[in-house]
Image: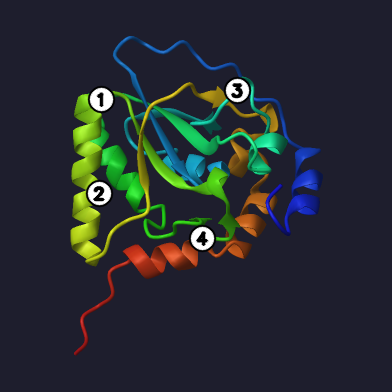
């Protein structure tokens, strides 16, 4: 369980409504997978963007089947907290998804993301084919050029995605108070502003 927030989370989960069944994906839709620390935050960062059909929180990149939150958060399975993004490539490109990803992670944290440390919270791009791998590599180079230093974010071939437990889905929508408490306390937005918000030039 994420440090300092276990009690708040437990209370919020009592009020969490059931998640509706996912609609079948039209053949034109594609999926992409990203890890950026807390999957509640990554899920909300991608939702409500034009062309994104849905986002599911889950686990990927580890060993063994049917990982649980307790096992993954304990760091024993090798899985990362991951989101699976379903999108319409006619409305939003994979390159644009990468831009959303970078602006919502700390590319230089090799220990995790924000207040969450451990391999389960590492940032990673899971590419699905050679084209996505090339675009991901190009995006890494762009970030390194922008900041003048290497990133710690990993590039990994896509592996099996395991959806997380029901109460972790749509966490911001279902538990806005707990979500805000966690996100603020973790210092996520302060660090993202420090990295990505352009400062006005000195006069």
- Check disc 2 and report the residue beneath it: 140
Alpha carbon of mark 1 to alpha carbon of mark 3: how far? 32 Å
Q: Nearer the viewer, mark 1 or mark 3?
A: 3
- Check disc 4 and report the residue beneath it: 188
Q: Is residue 93 visible?
A: no
Under circle 1, the secondary element is loop
Q: Are marks 4 and 2 in contact (CB under 8 Å)?
A: no
Q: Is residue 117 left or right of residue 32?
A: right
Alpha carbon of mark 4 to alpha carbon of mark 3: how far? 30 Å
Q: Is residue 159 left or right of residue 12?
A: left
Residue 62 location (% of width, % of height): 53, 30
Give whichever of discs 4 and 2 has the lower sequence position. 2
Q: Nearer the viewer, mark 1 or mark 2?
A: 2
Q: Are marks 4 and 3 in contact (CB under 8 Å)?
A: no
- Check disc 3 and report the residue beneath it: 64
- Check disc 1 and report the residue beneath it: 89
Residue 107 location (% of width, % of height): 37, 56
Under circle 3, the secondary element is loop
Give whichever of discs 4 and 1 has the lower sequence position. 1
Name the quadrant of the C terminus.
Answer: bottom left
Q: What residue is at 29 percent from the left and 42 percent from the top?
A: 98
Give whichever of discs 4 and 3 has the lower sequence position. 3
Q: What residue is at 25 percent from the left and 25 percent from the top?
A: 89
How dense is the environment of label 1, judged by Cα within 10 Å: few (below 14), some, or many (20 and up)? some
Alpha carbon of mark 4 to alpha carbon of mark 2: how far? 21 Å
Q: Is residue 6 visible?
A: yes
Work out whether residue 71 or residue 173 is closer to the camera in this orientation and state it.
71
> Is the residue 122 above or below the residue 107 in the image?
above
């Amino acid at each position: 369980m994420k440090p300092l927030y276990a009690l708040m989370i437990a209370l919020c989960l009592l009020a969490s409504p059931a998640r509706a069944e996912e609609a079948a994906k039209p053949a034109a839709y594609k999926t992409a997978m990203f890890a950026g620390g807390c999957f509640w935050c990554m899920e909300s960062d991608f939702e409500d963007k034009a062309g994104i059909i849905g986002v599911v929180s889950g686990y990927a990149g580890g060993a063994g089947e049917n990982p649980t939150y307790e096992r993954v958060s304990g760091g024993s399975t090798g899985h990362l907290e991951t989101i699976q993004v379903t999108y319409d490539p006619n409305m939003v490109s994979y390159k644009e998804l990468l831009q959303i990803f970078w602006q919502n992670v700390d590319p230089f944290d090799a220990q995790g993301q924000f207040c969450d440390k451990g391999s389960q919270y590492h940032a990673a791009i899971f590419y699905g084919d050679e084209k996505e791998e090339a675009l991901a590599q190009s995006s890494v180079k762009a970030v390194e050029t922008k900041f003048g230093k290497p990133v710690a974010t990993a590039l990994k071939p896509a592996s099996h995605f395991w959806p997380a437990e029901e109460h972790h889905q749509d966490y911001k929508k279902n538990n806005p108070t707990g979500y805000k408490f966690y996100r603020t306390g973790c210092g996520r937005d302060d660090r993202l502003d420090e990295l990505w918000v352009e400062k006005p030039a000195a006069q």
